[in-house]
Image (cartoon, rainbow, N blue to C red):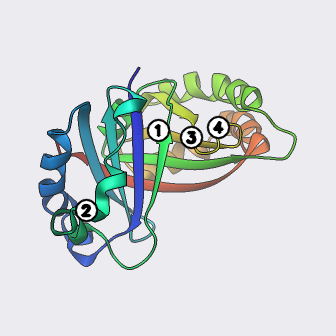
């Protein structure tokens, strides 16, 4: 089963101006690494934060981040000042369809006290099909736990034609109960990232 490595970082001015051009040299190196399936990168709409998602054949192949500082001439142009972080996510569904849309809703989720993965799964089992039926939303809803905190931390990717369409759908009365169930299960930070496939 594919494994996904998500790198989050303060974006440099170079990356913010043109994420594809800034990431292309590193993307080419990543793509030639054994086990690499694809590289996607993009900038958040809400803040100057960059995202890189590397798809690997297996979890055993996830090792690019360990060597980031060993390739400064390739990597450094994308990073601004500040901490870069890497998470390894076991998505239950592929996030590739979500990342192929104009923008991707990225939810960084932490289970609330007393809640379990099953509570989030139940909430998404209701929300997911409703989203799939909406024009301008690309299913499936892709979510899964991180390797770093598998019983607490989760990522969710949902593809949209625009952030505006996302908010229009979220305001519909029929979505209020399903969304309340998701919010009841987990605290979250939401961003819209405009991903491009680099390699």
Q: Quadrant of residue 2?
A: top left
Measured Cα–Cα span from mark 3 to mark 1:
17 Å
Spatial separation of the CA atoms under disc 4 and disc 1:
20 Å
> Are the residues flagged by discs 4 and 3 in contact, CB closer than 8 Å?
yes
- Disc 2 and disc 3: Cα gap in Å? 25 Å
Considering only order in the chain, which callout, 3 or 2, is on the residue closer to the N terminus?
A: 2
Q: Tag 4, which secondary structure?
A: loop
**Which disc is residue 70 wearing?**
2
- Spatial CA distance of label 2 from label 1 is 33 Å
State which tag comes first along the sequence, 2 or 1.
Answer: 2
Q: Under tag 1, what secondary structure?
A: strand
Q: Mark 1 points at which residue?
A: 158
Disc 3, SS: loop
Mark 4 to mark 2 CA distance (whole Å) = 28 Å
Left or right, residue 58 beside residue 12? right
Pick the front one: 74 or 19: 74
Quadrant including the N terminus? top left
Identify the residue under disc 3.
146
The x, y position of residue 103, in whole percent, is 36, 48
Provide residue 65's location: percent of width, then percent of height: 35, 52
Q: Where is residue 3 in the image (x, y as percent from the top left)?
A: 41, 31
- Nearer-the-camera pick, 161 or 115: 115
Q: What's the distance in space between the residues labelled 4 and 3, CA to CA?
A: 5 Å
User: In the rendered image of this protein, does residue 94 appear above or below residue 63?
Assistant: above
x, y percentage for residue 28?
A: 12, 47
- Decide: is 172 above or below 27: above
Occupied quadrant, residue 63: top left
């Amino acid at each position: 089963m594919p494994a996904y490595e998500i790198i989050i970082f303060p974006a440099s001015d170079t990356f913010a101006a043109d994420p594809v051009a800034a990431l292309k040299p590193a993307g080419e190196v990543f793509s030639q690494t054994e086990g690499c399936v694809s590289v996607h990168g993009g900038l958040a709409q809400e803040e100057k934060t960059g995202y890189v998602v590397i798809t690997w054949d297996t979890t055993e192949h996830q090792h690019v981040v360990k060597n980031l500082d060993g390739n400064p001439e390739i990597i450094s142009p994308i990073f601004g000042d500040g901490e870069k972080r890497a998470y390894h996510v076991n998505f239950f569904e592929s996030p590739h369809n979500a990342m192929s849309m104009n923008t991707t809703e990225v939810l960084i989720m932490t289970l609330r006290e007393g809640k379990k993965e099953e509570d989030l799964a139940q909430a998404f089992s209701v929300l997911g099909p409703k989203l799939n039926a909406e024009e301008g939303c690309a299913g499936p809803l892709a979510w899964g736990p991180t390797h770093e905190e598998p019983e607490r931390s989760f990522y969710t990717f949902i593809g949209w034609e625009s952030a505006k369409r996302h908010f229009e759908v979220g305001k519909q009365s029929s979505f209020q109960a399903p969304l309340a169930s998701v919010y009841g299960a987990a605290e979250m930070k939401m961003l819209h990232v405009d991903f491009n496939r680099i390699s």
